[in-house]
């Protein structure tokens, strides 16, 4: 049984200029149900992350500011979202979805959070449309019960996971790996355990070779017992923000490479969606749905 964690609050009603990135979430669910890749019983509503769980990663002061409408204008502007209490609750549910997916993956080998991948959030501030760092929160929750288990974070979003790299920079049990656009946001990159900064003009075959080489090596060398895979589709050549520019078929092949290796080595994996900003919403939805289609073929 593959569980897909989803809550209607993922699609928060925001002003039109902030709404586009959120429109994909219900459409992904609807498409997967329509084509019968998954059924209604596969979709599970996640619990909200508690302040205690969030507090293992984020500072008490930052959480207090968010809950009591105390962020400054600059702090709000840095997140990219207009502030609301509903937004804070949404972010708690997204973090809870990645936590719940962690426990589901331990039982079923793979689980999805239809949102997640908020990898730009730092302990004391949010940025880049990220309020809480859901992968960091879930990985830290996992480590409270399995402190000696190696964790691998595979971040293949077009943007470097700067917040995640910063959070785990002094945690040797958590290996952070990122392939990202060299000229994409953020301007200042943090140091992951392994960063591959890709220049514009890389070919599809070159990109896939990088993914295959490094995923295989990291599994062999670090022997992770839990993997978090950020499967952003903003690497597409149709993306408005991305500067990698591979085809949709290559994006799908990327997912096959990653998930086949994890299945081969029997490593549980939590998949989160990350970014996608193509001009046509249908391209974003289809590319994300490919990740689910691939997972079903490999794991069921």
Image (cartoon, helix red, strand yellow):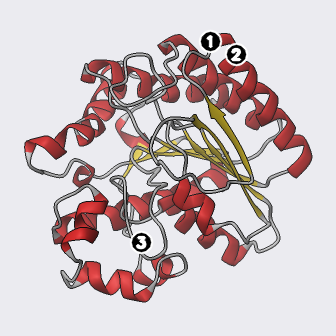
Confirm or deny contact between disc 3 and disc 2 (CB under 8 A): no
What is the CA distance from the residue labelled 3 to the residue labelled 2?
Answer: 39 Å
Image mark for residue 203: 1
The residue pinned by badge 2 equals: 206
The residue pinned by badge 3 equals: 49
Residue at 53% across, 75% down: 57
What is the CA distance from the residue labelled 2 to the residue labelled 1?
Answer: 5 Å
Q: Work out whether residue 35 or residue 158 is closer to the camera in this orientation and state it.
A: 158
Q: Is residue 264 visible?
A: no
Residue at 70% across, 48% down: 268
Image mark for residue 146: none
Residue at 75% across, 72% down: 146
Instruction: Answer with the quarter of the image where residue 283 lies.
Output: top left
Secondary element at image label 1: loop
> Which dot, 1 or 3, sits closer to the camera?
1
- Crowd rating for badge 3 (residues with CA inside 10 Å; few <14, some 14–19, many 20+): many
Confirm or deny contact between disc 2 and disc 1 (CB under 8 A): yes
């Amino acid at each position: 049984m593959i569980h897909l964690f989803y809550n209607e609050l993922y699609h928060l009603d925001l002003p039109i200029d902030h709404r586009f990135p959120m429109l994909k979430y219900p459409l992904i669910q609807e498409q997967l149900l329509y084509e019968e890749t998954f059924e209604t019983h596969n979709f599970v509503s996640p619990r909200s992350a508690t302040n205690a769980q969030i507090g293992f990663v984020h500072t008490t002061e930052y959480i207090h500011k968010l809950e009591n409408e105390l962020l400054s204008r600059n702090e709000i502007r840095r997140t990219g979202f207009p502030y609301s209490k509903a937004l804070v609750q949404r972010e708690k549910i997204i973090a809870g979805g990645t936590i719940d997916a962690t426990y589901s993956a331990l039982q079923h080998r793979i689980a999805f959070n239809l949102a997640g991948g908020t990898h730009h959030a730092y302990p004391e501030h949010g940025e880049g449309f990220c309020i809480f760092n859901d992968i960091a929160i879930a990985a830290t929750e996992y480590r409270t019960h399995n402190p000696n288990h190696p964790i691998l974070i595979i971040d293949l979003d077009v943007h470097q996971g700067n917040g995640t790299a910063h959070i785990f920079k002094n945690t040797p049990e958590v290996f952070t790996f990122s392939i990202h656009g060299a000229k994409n946001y953020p301007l200042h990159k943090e140091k992951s355990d392994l960063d591959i900064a890709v220049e514009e003009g890389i070919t599809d075959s070159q990109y896939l070779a990088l993914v295959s080489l490094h995923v295989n090596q990291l599994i062999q060398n670090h022997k992770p017992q839990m993997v978090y895979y950020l499967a952003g589709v903003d690497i597409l050549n149709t993306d408005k923000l991305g500067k990698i520019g591979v085809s949709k078929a290559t994006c799908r092949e990327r997912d096959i490479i990653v998930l086949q290796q994890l299945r081969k080595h029997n490593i549980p994996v939590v998949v989160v969606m990350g970014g996608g900003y193509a001009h046509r919403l249908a391209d974003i939805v289809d590319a994300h749905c490919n990740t689910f289609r691939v997972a079903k073929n490999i794991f069921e």
